[in-house]
Image (spheres, rainbow, N blue to C red):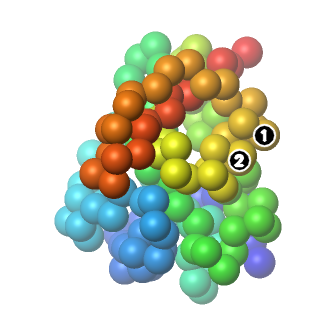
Amino acid sequence: MNSSPRPALPADLDAVCAVAQSSAFSARWSRAQYGEEIACGRGLFAVVGAEPIRGYLVLRRVSPEAQLVDLAVRPQDQGRGLGRALLDCAAAAARSWGCSRVTLEVSAANAAALRLYLRTGFQVVGRRPKFYNDGADAILMDLLLP
């Protein structure tokens, strides 16, 4: 299995949507919304895996920071280092843009993502109570970049 992230292409949209639909916590945008992310060039839209795509991330440049907007890995591929590879790719992109940090928000109900983010160096910097439709809090996290 190829675990090196690469930029997403329009041909990847169906696979990205399938990954998003399989994930309980993804943004689950429409195909058109993911397509706009590829076309707009606001940041980085990367995928990992080939035949099939196993995960993706959307990172936006909001200088002097980068914001992780969406990240998902197929449930059957979680725990194989793909999320870590995508986060490493995001940090490298943010550094190349001259950003000082990567920010994100994650549902307090998403224990697997919280563990991944903490293991990769993100720190909790805030909380938005009852932010999500299910009543879960949003946990605000930052990764400071050297």
Q: Residues within 10 Å of mark 2 (few under 14, many from 20)?
A: some
Residue appearing at x 66%, y 55% in the figure: 112
**Residue 109 percent location from the top left of the image:** 52, 51
- Residue 66 shown left or right of residue 10 in the figure: right
**Residue 55 percent location from the top left of the image:** 57, 66
Give the quarter of the figure containing the C terminus: top right
Residue appearing at x 46%, y 14% in the figure: 64
Tell whether label 2 touches label 1 (CB within 8 Å).
yes
- Residue 35 visible within the image: no
User: Whole-Å distance between the Cαs marked 1 and 2?
Assistant: 5 Å
Residue type highlighted by circle 1: Arg
Can you tell which mark lies on residue 119?
Answer: 1
For mark 1, give the secondary structure: helix
- Residue 36 shown left or right of residue 93 in the figure: left
Query: Between residues 54 and 96, which one lies in front from this camera angle?
Result: 54
Query: Between residues 142 and 102, which one lies in front from this camera angle?
Result: 142
Say which quarter of the image contains residue 128: top left
Residue highlighted by disc 2 = 116
